[in-house]
Amino acid sequence: MSDQAPIVVVDVGLGNLRSVERALRAALVAEGMAPERVRCASDPGALREAAALVMPGQGAFGDCATALHRHGGALAKAVGAHLADDRPYLGICLGLQVLFESSEEAGGAHGLGVFRGSVRRFRDGMTDARGARLKVPHMGWNQVLPTEDSAAAWLGRAHWYYFVHSYFVAPEEPSLGCVAGETDHGGRFVSAVARGRLWAVQFHPEKSQAAGIGLLRAFVRGLP
Amino acid sequence: MTVARRLIPCLDVKNGRVVKGVRFVGLRDAGDPVDCARAYDRAGADEITFLDITASHEARDILLDVVERTADQVFVPLTVGGGVRTREDVDAILRAGADKVSVNSSAVSNPGLIEAVAGAYGRQALVVAIDARRRDPNDPGAGWGVFTHGGRVDTGLDALAWVREVDRLGAGEILLTSMDRDGTGLGYDLELVRAVVEAVGCPVIASGGVGSLEHLALGVLPIAEGGGGADAALAATIFHDGHFTLGQARDYLRARGVVVRDDATPEDR
């Protein structure tokens, strides 16, 4: 048992958290750290005591927003306080999208609004340069190109990651500076954002083999 | 760059051990599925599929244990299929750590299962496997029938009508196996692959008949370039027998102009 503050995988009841938990443990072991630091939790008290939050999530933006704002928004407030202190946060898939204000997927649902902008759906009927149909959802391995050196330090230079999603984030001013990585699917979309110790990605590091474990190792390295 | 075509080794599992099927008969024991999956993960498989061919439903716990142990060590998407009959089967497999469940016969007998699983977990968690056979071996115009129970039962369904239906009901992907080609090493039934790719909006995984790297390339090259246009290529024998490594397959596909993942991840962080 470790007496260090835990790394909390936030459970909003959407999707299986175990693959994220397993991959984080593998990353901790690879860094010579105690794998027992990883916990899954859904109560705001546990979030407040966390050294780092990892917010995964598959499914619908609206369900995720609803879960965060349930019970007077206790979870949303705990996550918001964590981010306001610039404590380490890793968002995965919905854990990225929910940082924005709204989504085409769920009219009227409010995200955390950490960044200005919305979540949009890929258009149907897109084609690639060779005329092949691009499908929605965007599923499979694709490359993430970091926008600057500080992003390359955790995303890598042009690594391949596993994606599965139909929606992507579209930051707007004054949040355009959060863009950390881009990926091509019928044009470039934002596949990673960062601000201080907040990192959030559209792809699934827990399913992205060595590239993904490398990202998780970079995240846990140097945690308090 | 664009999304890569995927290479998926498939492991047939019976009573918790890996076997290899040739035309669905003549199986041989070939090792521990967890070790095999880990080896494929290290070798750069884009995904891994387990097909459980255990006859007895009572042996399900053995499979779930294999899935659980695999998920602890393998960090690419894992699909598990074979004998998935009920919503409870689906729940148990996903809970054990699989990312996707593949359904075949049960989707035919109970199409509502497709909607139920897609509704509960999202389309991405559901692969609908289809075993198709030509109505007339020499005339693709005669179409393909859908077979279940390892190819023994003719459902009477037309394959193209059925893939449109499962796409509409919520299949995240279609795993398309040609019964005519499975185990022959003669290559995919490209006419079948093209017809299905053009019929549906969801991704299509080509399966059945790969005997060479050329076959893999043809499965996933664009239709306009003479390929099948599939999103992913599933193969068993050519990888299991060590004829070719995944690395060789990847290099070959890249040389043929197919976008594939570069699994050599530099330690640059």
Image (cartoon, coloured by chain):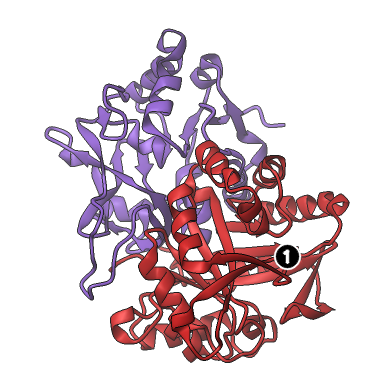
Chain colours: A purple, B red
Provide the residue designation for mark 1.
Answer: B149
Relative to B66, is B183 above or below? below
Q: Position of residue B35 (x, y in %)?
A: 74, 67
Relative to A158, is A93 above or below? above
In the image as oriented, which residue stretches furthest toward the left?
A: A173
Residue positioned 46% across, 83% down in the render: B140
Q: Position of residue B207 (x, y in %)?
A: 56, 75
Residue B4 in sight from this viewpoint:
no
Position of residue B145 in the picture relative to residue B152 (left or right)? left
Which element is circle 1 on?
loop
Residue A33 in sight from this viewpoint:
yes
Residue positioned 57% across, 27% down in the render: A5
**Which quarter of the picture shows residue B241?**
bottom right
**Which quarter of the picture shows residue A147?**
bottom left
**Which quarter of the picture shows residue A198?**
top left
The one nearer the camera, A180 or B86, is: B86
Q: Position of residue B240 (x, y in %)?
A: 68, 81
Numbered disc total: 1
Please state which amino acid type lies under the numbered disc 1: His
Residue positioned 43% across, 82% down in the render: B141
Residue positioned 70% across, 64% down in the render: B51
Q: Position of residue B142 (x, y in %)?
A: 48, 80
